[in-house]
Each structure stands twice: as C-alpha cells, then as structure tokens.
C-alpha cells in the first residue's frame, strides 16, 4: 500500500487557508492512484505530528505544499514527522533542486519518501501560465501582455526569491509574453510599483502563494493601487496608471496544482498509473479552488 500526505501551513486566523489543500487532495483522491490521501498542517488539525500515524500504508509519500525550500521544509516538517537521519544536505540542493530523500519513521514503522516543495518543481511554471490564462479567460494569452510573478521575498531566506526568479526565467524563455518580471512584497523590485516595470498596456499579476490570505487579498491589491480598501473589492482587470492590471490571486488555488503534487510523488517513485493524465483532463476546465 502507498499513501500520499500533503503537508501545508494552514492558519488559525484564515479559515479558507486550507481549502486549496483539501481541494487538491480531493482531486488526487478521485484518481485512485494512492490507497490513502491525507492532509496535514502546521497551524490546523490534523497536525504534521499526527497525520503520518493515521495512515495504514507502510510506504508514504510526503509532498510539502510550500513555495520554497527553507525553515518549514527543512526544519519544521522533518522534525514533526520524526524523520530519522534527516539532514537538509541530503537534498543536495542549491535552493531550487530538492527532489526526494527516503527515510524511516521508526516509531511509526513507515518508510517516508520526503519530497521537495511544490513551488520549486518545473511543473509549477505551467501552473503560473495556466493562472494567467484563467484570469484573462484566454488560453492563448501572451502577445501584448506583461506577466509579473510576485513573491513575498525576505532577507531571512534567500531561497524565497530563488523560486520566484527560477520560474520567471523559465516563462521568459518561453517567449510567450512581451515582458516577464519577478516582483516582491518585502524587497526590491516591489509590487507596489508594478506599473513602473512594464511598458505593456496589459499586465497579468500572479502571486506565487499557496493560498489566498491577507497578503494576496489585502496587501497586494492595495499596494498596487487596485483599491484603496480591500473590503470594497477591485475590478479585474483594474486600471492603474493607465495600464490594465489582471490580478490573479494565489497561484495555489489553480486546480492544475494537483498535477504538481502528483509530479513530486512520481519523481520520488510513486506508481500513479494514468493519474497525471486524469488530473490534466479534469483541471483544464475546472474553476480555481475556493471559487
């Protein structure tokens, strides 16, 4: 038997924070690729510490629903799962290369394939582009448009910006959008000045966040000038300094995110049959999680 555990942050303050995790788990559960699919959280129940002990399978694939390698993926989750012999060096990563390491949870008698975060997987690039297609309702969006990939950014974790830069460069190499830039909330270049960084009349803004919360639904819209008060909402597209801003909200609500979770598990050796093809088919016409 094989199980999948999706490890996410969750929130005591935002009841909607966990919804994308549940939605993506439901999508994967429907494929029948795993005997068990479980959600585990840091700030909600079931906790990381408990979830691994609720599965019956001996082989467990743990996929962190996080954007970057760092404190949660390298310290909190391995510690709470009690992964024997864990060391971040086992990933042999420069900040975007983490794939998988296989370890034991001795007191639970489980073999755990601990995967890199979804945010640094190559398939995430496709989810960002898909998010742009969704918000513009245009499967061919690109020519005439700029695309801003927005991250939190923090000097406390250099890997936070690496994930943003990685996908920004991959999308730029597609030569699909007229302009592609990485912007941040807490470091330069800042999303507050989004219109200063684009010449295109239309700019799609995709936050590389797992769930919609106060950053994506309050801070970023107000910082960009889409609205003076997030409580009154904003238009999509909205006009800022004469440019049309197509604000997408968190990329993690895009249904195609379930594909990235599966890709992580497959890279770690999971046998998922035709689940990837099923998810791609189902999510092509599915509204974003939480919509």
Image (cartoon, rainbow, N blue to C red):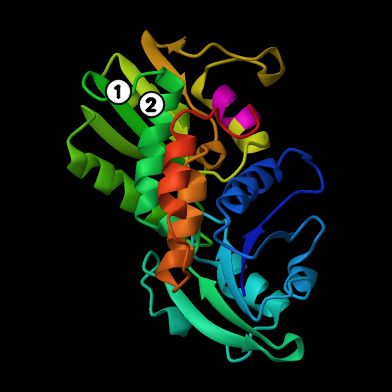
Q: How many numbered callouts? A: 2
Residue at 29%, 26% (x, y): give it: 146
Is residue 59 at all visible to an observer of this figure? yes
Q: Residue 55, position in %: x, y?
A: 74, 71
- Specify the quadrant of the image occupied by residue 93: bottom left
Judge from the rendering whether residue 183 lies leftward or rightward of residue 220; answer left or right: left
Compared to residue 201, the image places residue 152 above or below, namely below
Contact flag, marks 2 and 1 (Cβ < 8 Å): yes
Q: Is residue 59 left or right of residue 267?
A: right
Q: Which mark is residue 13?
A: none
Quarter occupied by residue 197: top left
**Quarter containing the C terminus:** top right
The local crowd at label 2, few if under 14, some if 14 to 19, many if 20 or more residues have their Cα within 10 Å, is some
Is 220 contained in the magenta span?
A: yes
Instruction: Indicate the position of residue 183 as horizontal and vertical percent values.
Output: 40, 39
231 lies left or right of 176: right
User: Residue at 35% of width from left, 46% of height from top?
Assistant: 125
In the image shown, does 143 or 234 lie closer to the viewer?
Answer: 143
User: Mainly helix, strand or loop, the magenta region?
Assistant: helix
Of residues 141 and 26, which is closer to you in this image? Answer: 26
Q: Is residue 226 magenta?
A: no
* Element marked by disc 2: helix
Q: Nearer the viewer, residue 101 or 214?
A: 101
Q: Which residue has dot 2 on it?
A: 133
**Residue 129: where, in percent of width, then height?**
35, 35
Q: Position of residue 224 (x, y in %)?
A: 50, 23
Residue on which the image places disc 1: 141
Q: Which residues are magenta?
A: 217-222
**Which residue sits at x=43%, y=66%?**
266
In space, the residues marked 2 and 1 are separated at their CA atoms by 6 Å
Q: Residues within 10 Å of mark 1 (few under 14, many from 20)?
A: some
């Amino acid at each position: 038997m094989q199980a999948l555990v999706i490890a996410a942050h969750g929130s005591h303050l935002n009841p909607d924070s966990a919804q994308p995790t549940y939605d993506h788990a439901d999508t994967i559960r429907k494929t029948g690729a795993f005997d068990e699919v479980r959600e585990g959280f840091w700030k909600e129940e079931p906790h990381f510490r408990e979830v691994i002990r609720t599965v019956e399978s001996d082989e467990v694939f743990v996929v962190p629903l996080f954007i970057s390698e760092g404190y949660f993926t390298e310290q909190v989750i391995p510690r709470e799962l009690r992964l024997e012999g864990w060391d971040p060096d086992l990933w042999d990563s420069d900040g975007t290369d983490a794939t998988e390491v296989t370890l034991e949870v001795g007191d639970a008698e489980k073999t755990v394939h601990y995967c890199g975060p979804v945010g640094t997987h190559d398939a995430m690039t496709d989810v960002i582009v898909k998010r742009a297609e969704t918000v513009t309702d245009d499967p061919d969006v690109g020519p005439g448009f700029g695309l801003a990939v927005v991250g939190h950014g923090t000097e406390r974790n250099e890997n936070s910006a690496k994930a943003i830069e990685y996908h920004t460069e991959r999308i730029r190499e597609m030569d699909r959008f007229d302009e592609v830039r990485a912007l941040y909330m807490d470091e330069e270049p800042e999303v507050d000045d989004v219109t200063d960084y684009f010449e295109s009349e239309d700019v799609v803004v995709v936050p590389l966040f797992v769930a919609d919360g106060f950053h994506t639904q309050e801070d970023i819209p107000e910082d960009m000038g889409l609205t003076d008060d997030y409580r009154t909402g904003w238009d999509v597209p909205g006009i800022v300094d004469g440019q049309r801003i197509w604000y997408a909200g968190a990329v993690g609500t895009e249904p195609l995110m379930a594909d990235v979770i599966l890709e992580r598990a497959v890279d770690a050796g999971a046998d998922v049959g035709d689940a990837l093809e099923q998810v791609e088919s189902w999510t092509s016409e599915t509204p974003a999680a939480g919509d």
